[in-house]
Image (spheres, helix red, strand yellow):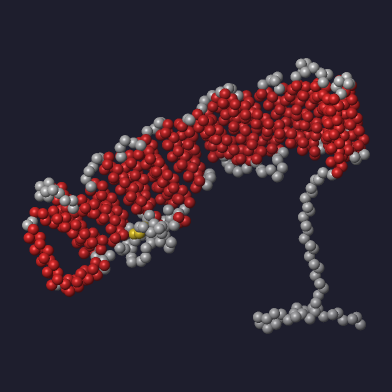
Amino acid sequence: MPPLAPPPLMPPPLGPSGGLPRYPAHFGAPRPLPPPPRQPAPPKVHRLSPQNTLLALGVLLILAAGATFLAVNWRSLPVTAQAGIIATLAALAFTASIPASRRTLTGTAEALALLGTGLLTVDLYGARALGLISPTAINTPTYSAIIAATIAVLTLLMTRAAPKVVTYGVITVIAGQLALPLLLLHRTTLPIILAALLAQVLLTLFLSAKGTPAIRRTGSITAATVLVCILLTGTANTLWGLLTESTTYQTAAVTCLAAATGIAILHKRPLPTTIPSGIGEAVCAAAAAFAIATTLPQYADWLTTAFATALAITGLLAPRRTGKFAVVLHTATITAAAVDIVYCMAREDLRQLGYLAAIAAVLAVYAALRRVFDPVPTTAVASLSAQLAIVLFASDGYINAWPAAIALAALATTGIAIACAYAPPRADLNAVVGGVGISGGGVGVGGGGAPGPAPVRLGSYRPLELVLLITAACAAVLAEVAAATTATFTATGVVLTLTAAPLVAYGMNPRRRPALPIAALLFTGANTAFMLAANAHKLEWYTLPPAILLLTLGILAWRNRSSWISLGPGLLVGLAPSTFAASTLTADPLTTGTADWLRATLVVAAAVALILLGVRRSLQAPFLIGAAATAKIAIAQLLDLTPLLPRWITLATAGLILLTTGATYERRLTQTKQATRWISNLR
């Protein structure tokens, strides 16, 4: 009978409700531990070994010995013997590097290759210095080109005999770059030299691509270095041509060709990942744009502006706004615009700078409408550029101060009008509802007996709305400065009116009530400017229009709050100055005070109307202001007539008043308290 199988393991029974499960009675096989996390391999650090150090020092010492040998023994030995000795040593070094490389003596082979190249270079230069080759027979650049070509050819042949020696390939690439420019120097023009170097760059990349990795890296580095030198030389030459007013269109063409070639090479062979993406394309584009921008002013000043504008329009209309193409286009646009701006500033051409600013404003408006870029900074650029253009035109005398002030005021009006569309449509709990609230407390209009409205915080404004308001304020300030330079005050009044008009519409939004007092202040200033321009001397011309405006705004924003907040400012501005002016004493009020009597009569009529309005509507501000104005006029007129009355009448009247007050003191005190309580209950 087979043995019975062990019973299967059952899951541990659960404990009571809410408790932990019971401790299991049977345990399974232990689970294997997870493998430890792999540590990343430390980066490989290339350190100079003792062998390489010794070999390098040995090569340097032998080269120094060769140079010293030629310098010291030039009298004791013939020049041909000295040159032959150094050449023999160089040949021995070249020859010894071949078996060293085949026996995997890498360090020794590299040192011998470097030693042979150095000795050959010292020998060739020393032979000319010691007179073996006459300096007049061949000039220094040409002789250096011959030496570079000789070394390049010899090291190229050595790469066939010792292909494992990296030094030969590297020296071949480096020495091959020096022969052509040294040979063409002083023999042809700069554009031809740059074009030849560009062809050499392509040839270097093509040939080095077939070699070892070290040769490919060396070819890439040398080609990039030569290409950068071509770009720098070309841009420097075009800049010098601009400064000296000489023609450099050929150099500019070669520079642009080199930049295009560099961009094409980078498309096929990108830079290492350690270098930021797009930096090579940006350098090439900047060089080409700089060369063109510094060449075009040699023919016409506006050509550079047209070139920068064409690039900007292309960037706005391009279907792709990211990637290498966008980097090239934006870099070229910024470079051309910067060159144009600097050139115009150097020539103090304010009109051309104004055209640049106007073009920037138009393009920024298009970009903001099409949402090519972020509308917030684009809107700021559009408004500020337009303002700068107007200021530059006015400074250059292209337009007068009057049109400049009106144009700047129109910009401010447009900005505020557009901001009205971006204001929130309805108020929330943190906004001002039906009143004016200014942070820091000063003005509040609203209703009810409730506490004052919450202040409008800066964070409640949308970014685009805030930018529009700030740029509009800047335009308004500039417009006022331009208006101040005119001969009359009319320009100031027009500017203030144009700025205040859209503020009224903006302030009608319940969350934007602080704009209403600002509009009232601007309208007051505009009215004052118009009256000064009209040479008006009556006080009421300066007080009644602002008073009417304040009363209108107060009535529009009135929500059953205190009448001092909604009606008090307008009533005080309209009635208080006239009341004080009507109280002025005259020498003969019955004959020479006609104007004061007319003003006093009108003030009393307005004050009585305010008293009746206050009593009828239970409004405290109209009642007290009207009563104070009536009392002022009455006291002033009484003081005017007092010198004409007999002295005993004045004394008798004062005595009767005191007797009546003393006899009915308790009743008058009670009536005064009742009147005070009634006045305090008014709104």
- Seen from the viewer's position, the closer of residues 298 and 243 is 243
| Residue 555 in view (yes/no) | no
- Name which quarter of the figure residue 241 lies in: top right
| Image: 4 above or below 639 | below
Q: Position of residue 636 (x, y in %)?
A: 16, 55
Q: Where is residue 425 in the image (x, y as percent from the top left)?
A: 41, 56
- Seen from the viewer's position, the closer of residues 662 and 603 is 662
Seen at 51% across and 30% down, the residue is 346
392 left or right, relative to 19: left
Q: What quarter of the picture does the N terminus occupy?
A: bottom right
Seen at 61% across and 35% down, the residue is 286
| Image: 10 above or below 533 | below
Seen at 78% across and 22% down, the residue is 143
Q: Position of residue 317 (x, y in %)?
A: 54, 39
| Residue 46 in view (yes/no) | yes
- Seen from the viewer's position, the closer of residues 26 and 93 is 93
318 left or right, relative to 676: right
Q: What quarter of the picture does the C terminus occupy?
A: bottom left
Q: How many marks are shown on the rendered structure?
A: 0
- Name which quarter of the figure residue 69 lies in: top right
